[in-house]
Image: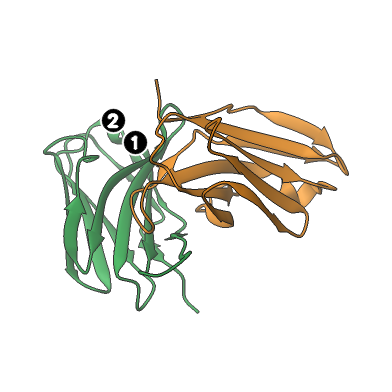
Amino acid sequence: DAGVIQSPRHEVTEMGQEVTLRCKPISGHDYLFWYRQTMMRGLELLIYFNNNVPIDDSGMPEDRFSAKMPNASFSTLKIQPSEPRDSAVYFCASTTTGRNQPQHFGDGTRLSIL
Amino acid sequence: QKEVEQDPGPLSVPEGAIVSLNCTYSNSAFQYFMWYRQYSRKGPELLMYTYSSGNKEDGRFTAQVDKSSKYISLFIRDSQPSDSATYLCAMSAVEGGKLIFGQGTELSVKP
C-alpha cells in the first residue's frame, strides 16, 4: 500500500520566493495534518483538516503561510514570501476516524531558504 | 514551560542494554499516549499507542503511562543497533485529534 506521499523531497530557494509543498494522503483517510520540524522547536503542528475542511490552523506561524485541501487526495502548504527562518523539514500526516488509529507520516520535504 | 518535556539526549548504550526513555507533561486532559520512532531523513512511525494509564507490551518494547504523575516511559529490552533512531513521545486529549510531541530523544545502540 502506498503511504503518505510528499513532494518535493528537497527544496532550495532564495528568500522572497514562493514555495509550494504537496501532499497526497493515504486513500480513505479523512484527516490530514501539516507539521514543521526544527532542531530548536521539535515537531510542531501547523494545521489540520478533516474531510477537506481546516479544523485548527492555530499553529500557522503567520499570514505568509497558507494551506489548502481541494479534495480528499491532495493538499498544499504554501509560503509566500519565504524567509530563511522558514528553513525546516515539513511533514504531512494522515489518519482516519476510529479507535487507535495512528497518524501515518510522509518522509517530509527538507526546505532551505537562502 | 512546554506542555510535553522530553530529554533530547543523545543517549548511547551498548547492544543488549535495556533502554528507558521518558516524557513528562503538564496537561491533565491528555488521555492518548504514543511513542514514535524516527530514522534519519524519514518521517516518524508509530511504535506504541496507549489509552489512559497502564502498561502495554509489544515484543521488546513496553510503554508505561502514569497519569497521576503525568509521566510516560518507553522501555526497550535487548536493544539492537537497528533501534538507533530518535524516539518521540506524543499525546492528545481526544482520539484522532491534535498531537503534542516531545522534543525527541536521540538513541544510539553500539554493537
Q: Which residue is mark 2?
A: A84
At 56% from the left edge and 30% from the top edge, which residue is drawn? B69
Q: What chain is tagged by disc 1?
A: A
Residue A87 is tagged as 1
Q: Residue A89's quadrant in the figure?
A: top left
Q: Tell me, by letter, which chain the rendering colours orange.
A: B
Q: Amino acid at mark 1?
A: Ser
Q: Residue B91's quadrant in the figure?
A: top left
Q: Are marks 2 and 1 on the same chain?
A: yes
Q: Could you tell me residue A68's position as x and y percent?
A: 16, 59
Q: Could you tell me residue B41's position as x and y percent?
A: 54, 49
Q: Residue furthest left?
A: A63
Comparing A4 with A47, the one in front is A47
At 40% from the left edge and 70% from the top edge, which residue is drawn? A98
At 30% from the left edge and 64% from the top edge, which residue is drawn? A31
Residue A70 is tagged as none
Q: Are marks 2 and 1 in contact (CB under 8 Å)?
A: yes
Q: Could you tell me residue A92's position as x and y percent?
A: 36, 56
Q: Residues within 10 Å of mark 2 (few under 14, many from 20)?
A: some
Structural distance between the alpha carbons of marks 2 and 1: 6 Å
Q: Amino acid at mark 2?
A: Pro
Can residue B67 be seen by looking at this rendering? yes
Q: Tell me, by letter, which chain the rendering colours green.
A: A
